[in-house]
Image (cartoon, rainbow, N blue to C red):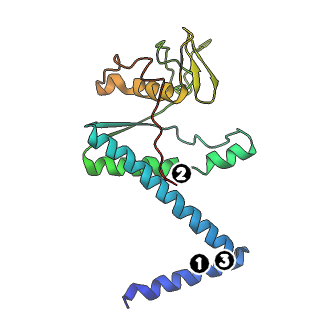
Amino acid sequence: MPDNYSSKQEGYRVELSLHKVLGTDNQNIHLTENRNRTMRDAVNKAARKVIDHCVSSKIGTVIFGWNKNQKDSINLGTKTNQKIVQIPTGRLKDRIAQLCEQYGIKFVETEESYTSKTSFLDADELPKFGAKPEGWKASGTRIKRGLYRTANGWLINADCNGCANIGRKVATILGIDLSGVGRGDLSAPVRLKLWYT
């Protein structure tokens, strides 16, 4: 047996004794470990899909919208909070960044404040977090989950609108031309399934 086998066993014994002191049982330990494995698998699969798409499409830059402490004090209702707060977006960001480095793809992290409220097609001003001008108002509106109405009345996918606005926040810095992105590009996103059942 390898030398570290006994240290792993001892670590497991210590972990089990801590669980017993804290009042958890084997069933809870099993459920927690199963959830952690499932989440790790989902993060790895999602990150791999992003990188595979970038490699096959010859995309050289990944832009990741991120607000630090975005889930702190979130108030979307008890059930929704439980679902949203448990999604490990920080792990996903770190995994995508790690794979980008491995494949020579540039990884850019930017803050994403007001990207969901602002209309990409109407070229609304995109304020930074904490710097919203007095009287600022978006020209369009999010009418329900997944649907955004522009000032012209066009209906586009709300997530695509937010994504395009995230790209717009760093487009000038990166020298990216977004003039070719139109209503058709923002209307019908492709949904990728991580698990096939």
Say few, some or many: other residues with alpha carbon within 10 Å of mark 3 (under 14 / 14 to 19 / 20 or more): few
* Mark in the foreground, 1 or 3: 3
Residue type at tag 2: Pro
Query: Residue 56: which numbered mark, if any?
Result: none
Relative image position of residue 156 (x, y in whole percent): 52, 21
Which residue appears at 38% of the width and 44% of the height?
50
Which residue appears at 34% of the width and 46% of the height?
51
**Residue at label 1?**
15
Which of the marked residues, 1 or 2, is nearer the chain's N terminus? 1
Residue pushed farthest top?
152
- Closer to the camera in the image, 163 or 153: 153
Q: Is residue 41 left or right of residue 147?
A: left
**Gap in angstroms between the C-alphas marked 3 and 2:** 24 Å
Which of the marked residues, 1 or 3, is nearer the chain's N terminus? 1
Q: Is residue 54 left or right of residue 160?
A: left
Which of the marked residues, 3 or 2, is nearer the chain's N terminus? 3
For residue 65, above or below residue 4: above
Q: Is residue 42 left or right of residue 59?
A: right
**Gap in angstroms between the C-alphas marked 1 and 3:** 12 Å
Regarding mark 3 in the picture, which secondary structure is present there? helix
Which residue appears at 52% of the width and 30% of the height?
159
Relative image position of residue 52 (x, y in whole percent): 32, 46
**Residue at label 2?**
88
Say few, some or many: other residues with alpha carbon within 10 Å of mark 1 (under 14 / 14 to 19 / 20 or more): few
**Residue at label 3?**
26
For residue 40, above or below residue 76: below
Quadrant of the image containing the N terminus? bottom left
Residue pushed farthest bottom?
1
**Gap in angstroms between the C-alphas marked 1 and 2:** 23 Å
Residue type at tag 3: Asn
